[in-house]
Amino acid sequence: MGDKEKASGEYKAENIKVLEGLEGVRHRPAMYIGSTSKTGLHHLVWEVVDNAVDEAMAGHCDTIDVTLNKDGSVTVEDNGRGIPTDPHPQYKVSTLQVVVTKLHAGGKFDKSNYKVSGGLHGVGISVVAALSKHMKVIVKRGGKKYQQEYVIGKPKYDVKVIGECDKKDTGTMVTFSPDDTIFTTTKFEFGILETRFREIAFLNKGVKIVLVEESSGKKEVFHYEGGLIEFVKWVNHNKDPIHAKPVYFVKEQDKLFIECAVQYNAGYQENVLSFVNTINTIEGGTHVAGFKTALTRAINDYANKNKINKGENLTGDDVREGLTAIVSVKVPEPQFEGQTKTKLGNNEVKGIVDSCASAAMSEFFEENPTVAKRVVEKAMEAQQARNAAKKAKDLVRRKNAFSVGGLPGKLADCSSNKTEESELYIVEGDSAGGSAKMARNKEFQAILPLKGKPLNVEKANTVKVFSNEEIMNIITAIGAGVGEQFDVTKLRYSKVIIMSDADVDGAHIMTLLLTFFFRFMPKLIEGGNIYIAVSPLYKVRKRVDHYVYSDEELKKIVAKLGGTVNVQRFKGLGEMNPDQLWDTTMNPKTRLLNRVTIEDAVKANDVFSRLMGDDVEPRKQFIAERASEAQIDI
Ligand code: 1YM
C-alpha cells in the first residue's frame, strides 16, 4: 500500500471490522441471502457483483465480466484495484483472507465512498464463500498475481503468489460453485442476471458488464454512455413519447449524488422508478418525495408565470400522468425502511433532491417552451379528467346508496368483519359466481362475480376507469381506495383471490385484473394480498377422484393408473358443482393459491406494457409461460 493511498484514507487494513464467524451463515442462510431457492441463489451473484460495482462507483473500475461456466460455477471479474493482499494488522494473515473468511469484513468506512448496501445486499463476499462448495479468488495487484481457494468458506492454503503481471494490470476475479446441499436449485438463469445487469449498467454510465453463458454461447454486453437518458428511453420504448429528448440532470452536493431523467409519454400511467446506490427502492422514500414536490412546483410555476393555467393549481397526480422518470441517488450512509426495506429514510435527501430538481426542471422548461407547453397541457387534461372522474365517482356512490353500507349489490359479502381472516374471491362470470356463492364458507369468504372482460386500464384514461361499474365494484368491495389515497388500514380482506377459468380467456381476465391492481393498488401486490386461484383442468376417477392441473400431470396419472378411464375435462369453473369447486379451489386446506409478487418494478413495468400493448403475440406467450407457475413474480 503506497503512502498516497494511506494519506487519502481510502483503504486501511486496520479499518476492517470483523463482526462474527461464518458458522451462522450455513446454519441460517436465509437470514443472509433471503432464501435458499432461486432468488437466494442469484443473491450470491449480486453479492460478488456488488463488490465490483462499489469499485466502479468509487471510480477505479470500468469493466465487469460475468461468466456462467459449463461446470455450473460462476466467474465474476473486474478491473479495479484488486482486493488488498497485505497482512492484516490484527489477524496477521492476508487482508484478502480476512475479507473472504470473516463475516461483514469491509474496508469502506470512509463516508465519501458510496457502498451498495441495502436490503439484503451488502452482506459480503464471505457469505458467498460460506455457501459455496468451492471458491477461488485471484487478485492482480502491484505487479503480482495472488490466489486463494476455499471449501465452504475455509481456506485450502494461505494466499500465494502464482505469477507476475504488469503493474497497471489490476483486478479481482472470483469463481464460485454454490453448495447444492444448501440450495434447492443451483442453476443460474441468464434472464434474471440480464435484467439486473442492464439496470446496473444504466445506473452507472460508462460501466461495461459482459454476461456470457458458456453452455449456450449466449453473450450480452451492457454498456450505456447515456446512462439514465438511455434508461428512460428504454422504459418508454413501447410507449409514445411526447418529446424526443428526455429532461436530464445530474448533481453532486454535500456528498450526495443525484441523477434524474424524465420523459413524458402520451399514455396515462405514472412510472417513477427510483434507486439508491443502484438498489431499486420499490417503496420510494425521501428522494422520490423531493423529486415529486419539485416537479409539481416547477410545472405550476411555469403554468402560472406564462398564464397557461387559470384558476385551480395542478396536483401531483395531474402532473404525473404519462410521466416516466428515473430518480437515482447515491448516498454514503443510506437508511432503508419499509416493509421490504426498499424505502429511503434519510431526511436530508428530500430537500437537496427538491432544490436540484426544481432548478433543473425550471431551466429545462424555460429553454424548451414547446415541450413545457405540451407537458402543462397534458397535466391540465388530467386535471379535467380528475374533476370529471370525481363527478362520475359521486354518481356511482349515489347509485350504490341503497346497497348495504355502500357495498356493491353484486357482492356476496362474508359475515366476519375481521380483515385478517376475510377473503374476497373475484370470479369470472355469473354462473361460476353462482357456484362459488353456494360453495363458499360464508363466515370468511366473500364473492364478487364479474361480468365479461374487465376494462384494460393501460389503455383508458382516469374518467373511463372510474366510470366503469365493474372496476368501481372491485374498489368499493376492497374498501381501501386507490392510488395515493390507498389506505391499507381500511382493507376489508387480507386475501384478494382472482378465480378465472383455466383457458386463454380466463388468463386474459387474470392479466387485465393484475394490470388494474398493479396500476391502481400496487401496495396490495407489495403487501402480498393478491392471489390467483389455480383450478384443475381434469378430474380422473378411479375409486377416488384425482384433480389434475396440467396436461403433463394428466399423462403421468393416466399412466400410473393404467390407462384412461374416466377422465372429465372441466371446461370452466361454472361446470363444477359447488362441492367440487369447494374441494378444488376454495377450501383453504386443499386449494392451490399463487401469491402475486413484484420482484422488480422495472421488469414488472415492462411486462405490463408489453402485455397490455397492441401486440397480441407477447401476451399469449406470457400467459402460456406464467399461468401455471407456482409463484408469479411479475
Ligand atoms: C469480483 C469481485 O471484490 N472487487 C474489489 C473489492 C475490493 C476492492 C477492489 C478494494 C477496496 C478498497 C481498496 C477500499 C474490496 N476491498 C475490501 C477491503 N470484485 C471485488 N475491488 N482497495 C481495493 O474499499 O478501500 C473489501 S472489498 F476491505 F479489503 F478493502
Image: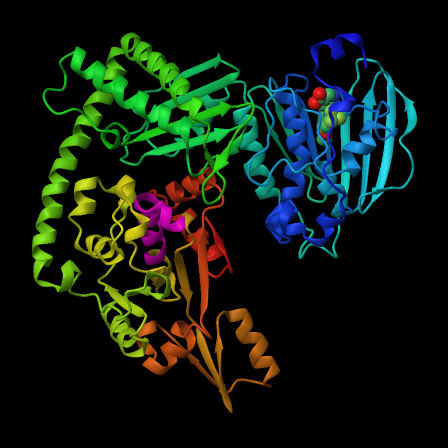
Region in magenta: 509-525
Q: Is residue 487 left or right of residue 102?
A: left
The residue sitting at 17% across, 29% down in the picture is 381
- Residue 71 screen position, x and y as percent: 78, 47
Coloring applied to the structure: rainbow
Q: Is residue 80 left or right of residue 267?
A: right
* The image quadrant in which ligand 1 is located: top right
The residue sitting at 45% across, 58% down in the picture is 595
- Residue 437 screen position, x and y as percent: 27, 74
Marks counted in the figure total 0
Q: In this view, does 568 lie above or below 186?
A: below
- Residue 438 screen position, x and y as percent: 27, 79
Q: Is residue 60 above or below residue 562?
A: above
The residue sitting at 73% across, 24% down in the picture is 15
Give the image quarter of residue 44. top right
Q: Is residue 10 left or right of residue 501?
A: right
Q: In this view, does 21 lie to the left or right of 32?
A: right
